[in-house]
Image: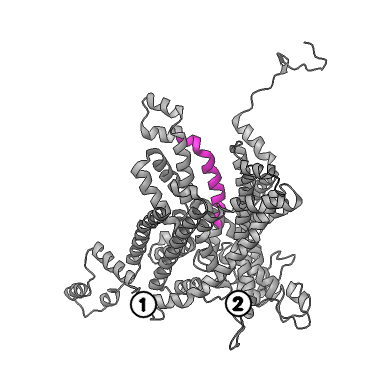
Amino acid sequence: MATTTDAPAITLSNKQYRPPTSMTRLIWNRFTKHRLAVVGLIVMIILVSSAAFAPLIRDHDPYKSSFRTRYEAPSLEFPMGTDDLGRDILTRILYGGRISLSVGMLAIIIAITIGTTVGALSGFYGGRVDNVLMRLVDVMLSMPRLFMLIVITMLLRSVNSPALQFLGGVPIIVVVIGILAWMGVARLVRASFLSLKEKEFVEAARAAGASNLRIIVRHILPNSMTPIIVAATLGLAGAIISESGLSFLGLGVQVPTPTWGNMLTNAQDEMLKGHAWMAIFPGLMIFVTVIAMNFVGDGLRDALDPHKSH
Amino acid sequence: MGRYLIRRILQSIPILVVISLIVFILIQLTPGGPMAAFEENPNLTPEDLARLEEQLGLNKPIHVKYYEWAKRIVQGDWGFSQSTRRPVLEEIFERLPNTLQLMGISFLMTLAIALPIGAISALKQYSLFDHIMTTFAFIGQAIPVFWFGLVLIIFFHVGLNNPTDSGGNFALSHLWDCQTCKPLFPGGGMNTYGLDDPPFSNRLYHLILPVTMLGIVGVGTYARYMRGSMLEVVHNDYIRTARSKGLTERAITLRHAVKNAALPIVTIMALELPSLFGGALFTETIFSWPGVARLFFRAAQRVDYPLLMGIILINSFLIIFFNLVADIVYAYLDPRIRYE
């Protein structure tokens, strides 16, 4: 079969030969088809890197107050205005992003760890273990989550430990959000384990003499990654909302450490005095982050699991 | 049905017990406690303290303490608020109707808007309406409730600039009534201040912004569920049967499709309830709505643990109760569930 082009393609039985597409490549190709997901990913990259390189973007001090620049409306000098203590809001948003984003990420790591463990044990062992653990999930889901978040945070705050009070109580917030957000993951992982444990590859592993722990960790878990990754992405958005809500009420991360939530703490009073910009920008950051993460989550779900469309 | 009902009620008892246990443990962990005041008194020897503990019944084993505490809860003795010195239950029941009114109206509005939107956008899948609706639902689900409340106040109450400054305002409130620059909607409270016997219309006027705020997440969530549910239902055999019988599209949609598609929503309602309580916390705080959630916020600021725990307990009870109701309603509407 002669070809007329200069660089003849290798042909195998009439079909042009293409190198096999790798799994990662396939997933990436499917992900990039979801245009909004790509936009979300780009937004997230911009947000994370601008928080990480905050000093390179603005050379203001996020903590230093100045009486001369109080309540400046947004202008070229202060693109997002200044707050009641004369601090540049854009700078505080960049530094606040560090706290808000890392609180969200750390909290969701805790939630995923607990949720995966509970879900895996529940789904794999079934019977009484399953019953007890799933009733625990029911109990946790029947409690008003935000209210629990507030009370447990208050209890931990009363413990006099410098490690817990670090950065305005960030470790407390991380742990409390984490231990109140794992139930959804547990249910997803359990469902995945329930269907996978009947599969032939599990039987094969058992026949080869693999222990239960090995089967769970090496054989079933890697196959349940799809729901876990999607839940982590969407959960990150939820964790960021939890932190900012708590901090908005003044019960989360304490001032002067800036977070997108606690920058809104006095915003309502300031709005009534005519300083609306103090309320708009920090909230807009939360909103943009959450929407971006939701898009990425949707894109990942379609990319990782092409059979199921939501 | 009777047997299902009894089984379902019995199932919620262990959950109640475990929740009360968690709340009890949290109470044990609260700092201070009844002995704190005595321990600081230098005139009391350790023996005195031990005797006091004995007399006050504080040295009993933990399970006995839990039993006694649970007994008091059942009998309606929930202790006293530390900040107001009034019985916890009295404080809660005084405000519960306000919360239920806000949540109830918000919930009904949410359903009244979300279900038709979801159904229509499923029937006209991929139309312009569907795209707009899906985007709106996505935004509604992602917007932080508390920030949305602030934005509502900015646009419909205070305006973007200093209210005393007449130039350059572009908030909607000023477009509406620029002669006096009067806010379009009230930004807080249940009735206009100073009104002796406010009519219900005044209450509704005050409910507009809080209900919008509390409902925004729900509208997005329910509309998306309804859309998905409708899309599944319209491919069912009974819809084809109805069509082949020669029924009008209208009858097929209303009598067969919508009815069946709305069924699973009942379960979603129960699942969404805790987040409705969370939303109420922000709504009541921002709009100074004198309900239980605002009471909770005040109690948190004053570190009033008895009140906080009482509110958590009552909210958990409400969530379990409404879960139960939702399950029973679902079983009533969909007989397949009962014979599982």
Report if residue A48 is visible in the image.
Answer: no
Closer to the camera in the image, B11 or B88? B11
Closer to the camera in the image, A130 or B175? A130
Say if the magenta span includes residue B50: no
x 68%, y 39%: residue: A32
How many residues crowd mark 1 within 10 Å: few (<14), some (14–19), many (20+)?
some
- Relative to residue B166, is residue A101 depicted above or below? above
Report x, y in % for residue B109: 62, 65
x 33%, y 70%: residue: B73
- Please give the count of numbered marks on the rendered protein: 2
Q: Main secondary structure of the magenta part?
A: helix
x 70%, y 66%: residue: A78
Q: Which residues are magenta?
A: A220-240
The residue that label 2 is drawn on is B188
For numbered disc 2, what is the local secondary structure? loop
Say if the magenta span includes residue A223: yes
Closer to the camera in the image, B230 or B147? B230
Outermost residue on the front side: it is B245
For numbered disc 1, what is the local secondary structure? loop
- Identify residue type, mark 2: Gly
x 42%, y 64%: residue: B317
Report x, y in % for residue B294: 51, 73
Circle on res. B64: none
Q: Quadrant of residue B36?
A: bottom left
Report x, y in % for residue B16: 37, 60
The residue that label 1 is drawn on is B80
Mark nearer the N terminus (2 vs 1): 1
In the picture provided, is A173 more to the left or to the right than B137? left
How many residues crowd mark 2 within 10 Å: few (<14), some (14–19), many (20+)?
many
